[in-house]
């Protein structure tokens, strides 16, 4: 399986293993080049004043960032298994975003609001047509 398919296919082996456990194993972090480890650390929040800088020789799963990284890994794996990493899904999601900005779903959204809540929605979320200033 190609690297691209491994990272995007719904049936990828990466969706079936416990990535956090695999990545926590002794030596796993060391298999990455120093450049790759630095690039991965660049995705983490910068250290606060007075804290030591990130050490690319330390596996981030052995730092206080561990729970956050593990949660993001789980989310990514769920998205992978759900097909949300495929090119087709991403293109459809981008198109849906454009259509929503263009107002294509406004009529449907309003009818759903009426069906679920029995009333039409306000003109403005703050109230009134002028953002709540007409009171």
Image (tube, rainbow, N blue to C red):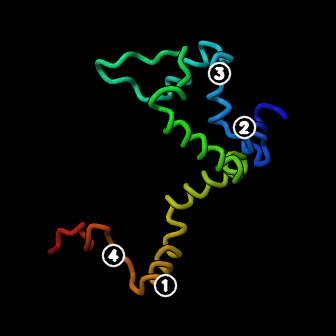
Tell me which numbered mark, 3 or 4, is placed earlier along the sequence. Answer: 3
Quarter of the figure with the C terminus: bottom left
Q: Residue at x 39, y 82 (%)?
A: 120
Looking at marks 3 and 1 on the same chain, the residue that comes earlier in the sequence is marked by 3
| Disc 3 crowd, CA 10 A, few/some/many (<14, 14-19, 20+) | few
Q: Return the residue found at the far right.
A: 1
| Disc number lying in front (3 or 4) | 3
Mark 2 or mark 3: name the one nearer the start of the chain: 2
Q: Residues under labels 2 and 3: Cα distance?
A: 23 Å
| Residue 122 circle label | 4
Distance between the Cα atoms at labels 1 and 2? 41 Å
Residue designated by label 3: 26
* C-alpha distance separating marks 3 and 1: 56 Å
The residue positioned 60% from the left and 51% from the top of the image is 94
Q: Secondary structure at mark 2?
A: helix
Residue depth check, mark 2 versus mark 3: number of the one nearer the observer: 3
Q: Earlier in the sequence, mark 1 or mark 2?
A: 2
Kindly report the distance in space between the C-alpha atoms of the residues bearing marks 4 and 2.
43 Å
Which of discs 4 and 2 lies nearer the camera? The answer is 2
Looking at the image, the residue that sits furthest to the front is 26
Q: Which residue is mark 2?
A: 7
Work out how far the residue at label 3 is from the one at label 4, CA to CA, in angstroms.
57 Å
**Circle 1/circle 2 CB separation < 8 Å:** no
Q: Secondary structure at mark 3?
A: loop
Please name the residue that numbered disc 1 is placed on. 115
Say whether disc 4 or disc 2 marks the residue closer to the N-terminus. Answer: 2
Q: Toward the viewer: 127 or 130?
A: 127
Rendering quarter of residue 51: top left
């Amino acid at each position: 399986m190609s690297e691209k398919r491994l990272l995007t296919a719904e049936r990828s082996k990466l969706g079936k293993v416990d990535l956090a456990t695999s990545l926590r194993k002794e030596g796993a972090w060391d298999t990455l080049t120093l450049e790759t480890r630095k690039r991965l650390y660049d995705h983490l929040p910068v250290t606060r004043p007075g804290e030591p800088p990130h050490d690319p020789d330390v596996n981030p799963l052995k730092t206080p960032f561990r729970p956050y990284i593990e949660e993001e890994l789980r989310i990514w794996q769920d998205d992978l298994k759900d097909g949300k990493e495929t090119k087709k899904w991403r293109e459809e999601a981008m198109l849906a975003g454009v259509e929503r900005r263009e107002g294509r779903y406004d009529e449907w959204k309003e009818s759903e609001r009426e069906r679920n809540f029995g009333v039409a929605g306000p003109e403005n979320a703050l109230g009134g047509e002028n953002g709540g200033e007409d009171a």
